[in-house]
Image (cartoon, rainbow, N blue to C red):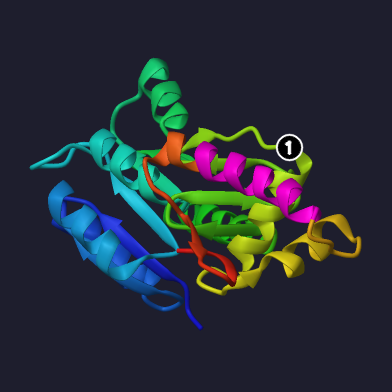
Amino acid sequence: MHSKILIIEDNEDIQSLLFDVLSDNYLVYKALDGINGVSEFKKVQPDLIILDLMLPQINGESVLKIIRHQSKVPIIVLTAIQNKDKTVAMLNDGANDYLTKPFDIAELQARISVQLRNNQTDNNHLLSFDNIFLSNQTHEVTANNKSLVLSKKEFNLLQILLAHPHQVYEKSQLFQMIWHEEYFDSSDNTLNVHISNLRHKLANTTGNNYIVSIWGIGIRFV
């Protein structure tokens, strides 16, 4: 399946050039301003974004922040601005790479390949739901782009729930999966403490209650 690339660029000549070159290997989508760029991002869910900074409606820096708040999709910025402070700020705001205009098409294609390859590798180790991301490789968890500090058991609990959201887990099942011990009635209190702690940490960071209790059965992640 071809990767999807979204080009957010208000210069129609550059946009057409990129579209023609990239369409041979990718599914390519276009937007001429910041508002339509965000709208296309939500509709298309691209695998990579090429983003111009000097956009009408809302500028590229704002588009970058909006998209990065919702997704870790690779973003390559195209800019005519050659300013070190701007570049540093842009990378700090979540850009994965950048090229200054005028740019070399072959170099852009190479950078696209690198970002897509890196993202595919990351995704093999990444679990996500909504704005929550868990890395099996680094054991890092973020929610709404904020780092979440979890105990080992809380991490393991979230790992199970994120792997199969909406699935209902019995408490005895969860206890055995996390503690690798036989479940007794007294085990319920131990598990409940960890569920409660994880629920509150997620709610405090996101404002949402993701862990829902199913009375008499168990819990699920929604």
Q: Which residues are magenta?
A: 186-201
Residue that carries the numbered disc 1 in the rendered image = 151
Position in image of residue 208 (x %, y %): 38, 47
Kindly indicate the quadrant of the structure image that contains residue 198. Answer: top right
Q: Nearer the viewer, residue 149 or 178?
A: 178
Instruction: Name the image quarter holding residue 127.
Output: bottom right
Furthest-top residue in this view: 85
Residue 175 in sight: yes
Q: Taking 182 as reference, is 141 left or right?
A: left
Residue 101 seen: no
Q: Residue most toward the right?
A: 181
Residue at screen point 37% across, 40% down:
207
Q: Residues within 10 Å of mark 1 (few under 14, many from 20)?
A: few
137 left or right, relative to 94: right
Give SS at disc 1. loop
User: In percent of the image, x 37 and y 69: which residue is there?
Assistant: 21
Q: Is 30 on the left or on the right of 210, as rendered?
A: left
Farthest front residue in view: 185
Percent position (x, y) of residue 180? 90, 61
Residue 169 in the image: x percent, y percent?
A: 63, 70
Give the answer, above or below, for where 9 lies relative to 150. Answer: below
> In terms of secondary structure, what is the magenta stretch mainly?
helix
Foreground: 221 or 171? 171
Amino acid type of the residue tagged 1 in the rendering:
Ser
Residue 150 drawn in magenta: no
